[in-house]
Amino acid sequence: LDDETCVFNDHLRIDRYRLTHMRYDGAWSRLIQREVMSRENAVAVLLFDPYRQEVLLIEQFRIGAWVAGESNPWLLECVAGLVEEGEDAEEVAIRETLEEAGCSLIRLMPIAKYLTTPGCSSEQVKLFCGQIDATGVGGYYGVDEEDEDIWANVWSIDDALQLLDDGKICNSMTIIALQWLALHHVNLTTHWIENTNWPP
């Protein structure tokens, strides 16, 4: 690392790096310059009721989708939020599920940890599937001081996966979570209802 400079710091922070790195041929690269959005890590939860075979998805306006020219910038998503100081991922999952969906988590199953856009952002997402009781849930939620306006709605697994197949879901965390659930929901249902030992 030759130099690190903060070039912008408001709702987002952008740092400029000048560095070299080892190449595959064993030589060092020339000095390169890159800007990186430095951001707190995030936690996302796909909420699943194994008894009703339903998932809860939220919908909200996303400025990035609007800037990208999406015809509908109100995106269907998992519950998600940023990790605040002193919190662990499970605490974020509990907090965001209550704030954005108005319900309580029963338990969590880890799905994946991944970098959202490693070419220009340091953000990592820890992704879970969370058990809920979907009876009577849904409605409008969000934190006023964060200007959140969130609609929470329950979908059958089949309907949610059809949304995925139809291209109605266009954010990575929800695509990954629903694809994972499509592969594992039978075993997960058995595990959560019968408390079996899965995964082995």
Image (cartoon, rainbow, N blue to C red):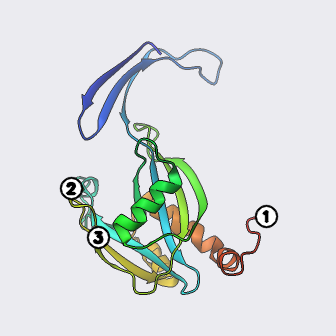
Query: Can you name the residue that lies furthest to the front here?
Result: 86
User: Residue 93: horizontal and vertical position, in percent?
Assistant: 47, 59
Q: Would residue 77 be visible to someone looking at this image?
A: no
Circle 2 crowding by C-alpha within 10 Å: few under 14, some 14–19, many from 20 = few
SS for callout 3: strand
Residue found at x 44% / y 15%:
31
User: Residue 123: horizontal and vertical position, in percent?
Assistant: 44, 42
Name the disc covering residue 124, or none: none
Name the disc covering residue 200, or none: 1
Residue found at x 39% / y 22%:
17
Distance in Å between CA atoms under marks 1 and 2: 43 Å
Compared to residue 11, the image places residue 139 above or below, namely below
Compared to residue 189, the image places residue 96 above or below, namely above
As drawn, is 149 to the left or to the right of 51?
left
Kindly identify which residue carries mark 2: 145
Name the disc covering residue 141, or none: 3
Q: Number of labelled discs? A: 3
